[in-house]
Amino acid sequence: MTGPRISLSRWGRDHWSTLAYLETRAVDQGGVIKNAHMRTSVKRHPLFAARGGLGSPTDSGKYPTSYRDGEMPEHDDWDCLNDMVEAGLLSVKPANPELWEIPVGSRGPIKYRRSIPTKELKVTVKLTELGQRVAGELRAYKQEKGSRFAEFVPSFAAALAVANGMEKAEAGA
């Protein structure tokens, strides 16, 4: 998956709540993501949009990603997940890598135009050692502060962002 990126130092409510959800799935569900629990833009990630009661996709694309400096339209939980991969917090294992790597907004190869078996869309995540540290800090923060994901900053966020080169890339853009 490709798309607009938000560096770790700018993450806010949506990134941290998505990380909390992904950690829960990694710990309790073998890492398997439930698409219906992900904020999904049908325009950006049509294959991963959960189907509603009448079979039509549920579109969360009207809800932008809230981050520290504002909001980014057309950035959903799948994009937040990719930001986490870029930051080195987790790894992703799609059941079908061919479907995972399709261009944003595409329905994929012609052989998938009619229907895609659900098992082909299964995505599994695993937290890295760094991801486990950040998730641990996030849990401790939530226990102390309550439901204020927006203000969470891991203790080593600035050093991590620089080490990953994300700050440098943004400065040059």
Image (cartoon, helix red, strand yellow):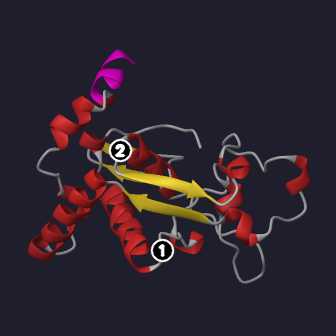
| Boundaries of the magenta span | 167-173
Q: Which mark is residue 88?
A: 2
Residue farthest to the bottom, as pictured: 53
Disc 1: which residue: 30
- Give left or right: position of 157 versus 144: right
Can residue 134 be seen from the camera position used here?
A: yes
Percent x, y of residue 155: 11, 50
Mark 2 surroundings within 10 Å by alpha-carbon count, few (fewer than 14), some (14 through 19), many (20 or more): some
Residue in front for this viewpoint, 158 or 69 = 158
- Residue 27 quadrant: bottom left
Q: Nearer the viewer, residue 61 or 132?
A: 132
Q: Amino acid at mark 1?
A: Gly
Q: Kindly state the secondary structure of the residue where label 1 is placed.
A: loop
Answer yes or no: is residue 69 visible. no
Spot occupied by residue 89 in the image (x, y as percentages of width and height): 34, 50
Snapshot quadrant of residue 122? bottom right
Give the mark nearest the N terminus, 2 or 1. 1
- Element under label 2? loop
Q: Residue at x 9, y 73 (%)?
A: 144
Which secondary structure is most common in the magenta stretch?
helix
Report, in whole angstroms, how far the alpha carbon at label 2 lies from the one at label 1: 19 Å
Disc 1 packing (10 Å; few <14; some 14–19; many ≥20): few
